[in-house]
Amino acid sequence: MSISNDTKKQQLRWIPLESNPEILNKMIHNHGVDCKWGFIDIYGFDDDALAVIPRPATAIIFLFPGSPAYDEFRAKDEARLALNKQAISDNVIHFKQTIENACGMIALLHSLSNNRQINGDGLFKRIFDATREMTYDKRGEYLESCSELANLHHESACSGQSYTPDIADPCSNHYISFVEVDGEVYELDGGRPLPVNHGKCNDFIQDTAKIMQSFIERDPEFNEYSAIALAKLKE
């Protein structure tokens, strides 16, 4: 989904990523992330489905349909946040999305960069090291110029199980991520100017499931929802 705050210049455009743990795991494991960690599908938000997700799980990538109902909610939420300043941890890393259809990669970056339990070396670590002290806007500019990331995204977007769309095809679905930082749950969206602090984290999986359910309740007629957890799969 082409959500971005930057309307003053021509945007770069990528092919959308498929919501597929196999693709995401290939990306991260081939570029320095410990194979003990990986993405898995979340098959439902009831207690039984959530109970089978390995712990610890430190991030969730959520795919949902862009719609008039979401646009209306987001406008109201932005106004709410403008009036009620949030407390946001300095440890939260937020990337700006300036590339159309790059929201899947942005969600992946958010999931990894805010996970201090994952060690490794490679492309992602180099990106995080280079951008850690940057502002939100500067991070967006950096990603635009990162040809290695663009190449990885293109290769991964063309390797899915479903039909690979043409780069010019419209895309209305959008990825965001949820992470736990300093004991609180944050919603990270490269198209929003700030992280959204959802408050104290009691159980990351259960707390995030409630937030995702609220997205579905706003648009119950849509069925293009999916969720993927980043979890420790083995010792």
Image: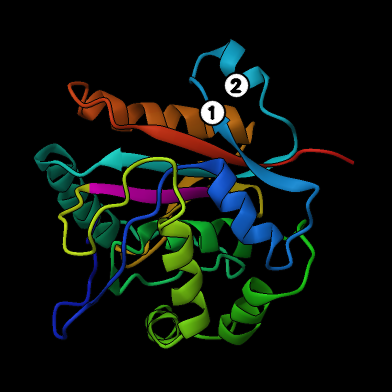
Kind of residue indicated by mark 2: Leu
Asked if residue 46 is positioned above or below residue 96 in the image, the reply reads above
179 horizontally vs 210: left or right: right
Residue 176 is covered by the magenta coloring: yes
In-front residue for pair 77/28: 28
Tag 1–tag 2 contact (CB < 8 Å): yes
29 horizontally vs 158: left or right: right
231 horizontally vs 101: left or right: right
The residue sitting at 20% across, 44% down in the picture is 66
Asked if residue 234 is positioned above or below residue 159 in the image, the reply reads above
Q: Which residues are magenta?
A: 173-178
Kind of residue indicated by mark 1: Ile
Residue 180 seen in render:
no
> Which corner quadrant of the image does residue 98 belong to?
bottom left
- Magenta segment, prevailing SS (helix, strand or loop): strand
The residue sitting at 30% across, 33% down in the picture is 215
> Which corner quadrant of the image does residue 41 belong to?
top right
Name the residue carrying label 1.
Answer: 42
Say which mark, if any, is on residue 50: 2
Q: Position of residue 3 (x, y in %)?
A: 23, 61
**Alpha-carbon neighbours of circle 1 within 10 Å: few (<14), some, or many (≥20)?**
some
Query: Quick one: SS at disc 2?
Result: helix
